[in-house]
Image (cartoon, rainbow, N blue to C red):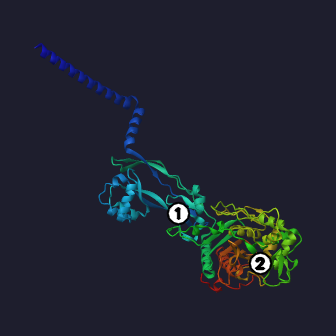
Amino acid sequence: MSRQRAQRDSYEWRLYVILGVVVVLFVSLAGRILFLQVLEVEGGREFLKSQGAMRSVRTAEIPAYRGLITDRRGEPLAVSTPVISLWADPRVLSTVADLAPLASALDIGVDELGTRLAQYSGKRFMYLSRHHEPDSARRILDLRTPGVHWTREYRRFYPAGEVAAQLVGFTNVDGTGIAGLELAYDDWLRGVAGRKQYIKDLHGEAVRDIGVLQEAQPGRPLQLSIDLRLQYLLHTELQRAMQVTGSESGSIVTLDSRTGEVLGMVSDPAYNPNDREALTPGATRNRAMTDVLEPGSTMKPLTLVAALESGEFTTETLIDTSPGRIRVGRKVLPDPSNYGEITLSRVIEKSSQVGVTKVSLALGHEPVWEVFRRFGLGETTGTGFPGESAGQLPSRQRWSPIEQVTLAFGYGLTATPLQLARAYSAFANGGILPQVSLLRVDEGERPGQRVISSDTAWQVLDVLHRVTGEHGTARKARVEGYAVGGKTGTVHKVGPGGYLQDQYIALFAGVAPIDEPRFVTVVVLDRPKGDNYGGGAAAAPVFARVASGVLRLLDVAPTQLPAIPPVQDVASIGRVTP
């Protein structure tokens, strides 16, 4: 009996102990809750919130809109449009028995989709496809395939297509600039992504948004200096010239000499930035800024500047070019014919090698080299454009006579078409070399530096006008109703063994109008074919059509000087099959 009572007492004691432990635990739990919820209100609640958030709240990125690129008149050149990108959780998607409907909607093979899933095995994120139109993405999402999700992004679109492609450039699939001004001003154009919070369920699916932590900041807009109307004009005329002359490549650039703004700049071959499947590296080059060439006879007006500044020459100084050729060392430099005794102005009009050679030998290389340097040759134009070339202006301790002479008529140095246009802008701008800008310049701003006197600039302009006259090499550059001026250039291409005798570059650099000089246009055609390969036959007519369009589109009044009537339209040049 006593043993049974002892056992019962032992059971009761154990029961009391267990109940006591339970009560203590309950009191401790209640006390902890009271402590967190009442005694430490802020700290307790924040702790509980943070613990809950760790298990159910996630943060997502809000994509930012990339800055708009426009021309000087506000016409869009690059815009960002909202698109849908599809992604998947490979762990979930790999459990789907039938992937055929999804693969078909994505326009890929089932095996390819399976291979991609295997590559991302064990991971929680994999892009299925990027940048869908909303309607297209909705059709795929309507399949309700487990593990397939979507996110909003932006895709760059270029309304002008290939017309402004090499200048504007393009972005990659992530919206980062990788070419042209998209690359140069990527930090300016790129926005700052925002952040938002959302609640997810046990499967990781988003249930609802609960708040924006940081608003997305769109990129800043960029207004270029180009006029899209002129850009279309230049593009059309270059395409036409390529077909007419059979050239392999070419470029045209038009500057406002007063402000240094690039009003138009095109290159060929071109490409469509909205469809890059057949894109080739050569098509992306902005040849007006990246490709260098020997400028040839287009440098003779700069040699004329050196002659005028020396005080030994005027535009009317007589130079004997008989008998139509001259020997310098072992090299014989010929003219097309014996011009006899002609003025220095006529030397430039006829592009006489003999006349320029005699002027160069009289001056020495230093004055000519110094003028070339002052006009910006051998240095970049400072636009900041990716890949812009500085060209090369040689600097030697000792110059041979032939090196001295060839420099004076544009050989032995290299320049870009933009550098050449900038140099001629000094003539049109009263002797002030402008600072080139690819962005719109505020009205009244005319940055630049004086490189020659205004009197010298006007004398050179007068000679350039005569070049388009009856005795000049640029009669086909005339524009009906306007007095214009310029200089032709025909340069032999350089090959592995030296100059190629049957391959040329045709150039023309011109100013319009002469009475109120402002717009400078440079035309470059690489390897024109047939008999019309020279600057006067191939490039000058292109200038005439471009200058005519520029003057009329910008409402420039007809010239007050007696304009020389146009001779021949580019369409009348014999066509050549490339």
**566, above or below 495, in the image:** below
Q: Outermost residue, left direction?
A: 1
Q: Where is residue 77 in the image (x, y as percent from the top left)?
A: 56, 66
Q: Position of residue 540 (x, y in %)?
A: 70, 79
CA neighbours of label 1 inside 10 A, class few (<14), some (14 to 19), many (20+): some
Please name the residue that numbered disc 1 is placed on.
79
- Residue 147 found in image quarter: bottom left
CA neighbours of label 2 inside 10 A, class few (<14), some (14 to 19), many (20+): many
Along the horizontal axis of the image, is 381 left or right of 90?
right
Q: Disc 2 residue type? A: His
Looking at the image, which residue is at 15% across and 18% down? 8
Image quarter (top left, top right, bottom left or bottom right) of the C terminus: bottom right
Q: Disc 1 residue type? A: Val
Dot 1: element: strand
- Residue 411 found in image quarter: bottom right
Looking at the image, which residue is at 81% across and 64% down? 370
Q: Which residue is nearer to you in this view: 523 or 405?
A: 405
Residue 43, can we see it?
A: yes
Q: Which residue is nearer to you in this view: 329 or 50?
A: 329
Please name the residue that numbered disc 2 is placed on.
465
Q: Which residue is nearer to you in this view: 318 or 119?
A: 119
Looking at the image, which residue is at 59% across and 83% down? 577
